[in-house]
Structures are given as structure tokens and as C-alpha cells.
Image (cartoon, rainbow, N blue to C red):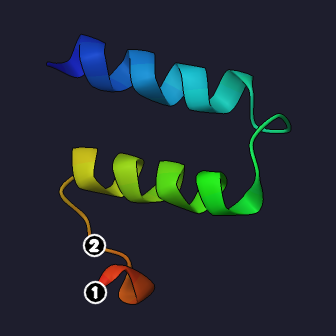
Amino acid sequence: MSDVSTAQINCLVVVPSQITPHSRFRALETIASLFGLSLPKTER
């Protein structure tokens, strides 16, 4: 499980400049979800 989260985070960190701000925010949402956290603006 930790391997999967690490792999995803690694991919998101390796290519941060090739993704749009919106996609970057989505990436943050994914990371937050992996850590069981919730972003303030994520509440829909």
C-alpha cells in the first residue's frame, strides 16, 4: 500500500512542471486522499 502511494507521489513530483495548475491541484487532492487528509477547497 505504501509502495503504491509512494509511486504515485514520486510520479507527481518527478513531472510537476509538465502538468497544468488544475492537474497539479488534482494531484494534491490525490496525495491528500492517500494520507487521509482533506483540503478546504476540496469539499464539494
Where residue 32 sits, quadrant-wise, is: bottom left
Q: Residue at x 48, y 30 (%)?
A: 9
**Label ID, residue 8:** none
Q: For mark 2, what is the residue?
A: 38
Question: Residue 24 in the image: x percent, y percent?
Answer: 64, 53
- Pointer 2 or 1: first along the chain: 2
Q: 13 or 26: which is nearer to us? A: 26
Where residue 8 sits, quadrant-wise, is: top left
Q: Identify which amino acid the numbered label 1 is placed on.
A: Glu
Q: Quadrant of the C terminus?
A: bottom left
Q: Identify which amino acid the numbered label 2 is placed on.
A: Ser
Question: Residue 3 in the image: x percent, y percent?
Answer: 27, 11
Where residue 34 sits, quadrant-wise, is: top left
Q: Residue at x 51, y 48 (%)?
A: 27
Circle 2 — which element? loop
Q: For mark 1, what is the residue?
A: 43
The alpha-carbon separation of the residues under discs 2 and 1 comes to 8 Å
Left or right of 2: which side holds 22?
A: right
Q: Relative to residue 36, is residue 42 depicted above or below? A: below
Left or right of 35: which side holds 31?
A: right
Q: Residue at x 75, y 37 (%)?
A: 16
Question: Residue 20 in the image: x percent, y percent?
Answer: 76, 52
Q: Residue at x 25, y 65 (%)?
A: 37
Left or right of 27: which side holds 36?
A: left
Q: How many dots with numbers?
A: 2
Are the residues flagged by discs 2 and 1 in contact, CB closer than 8 Å?
yes
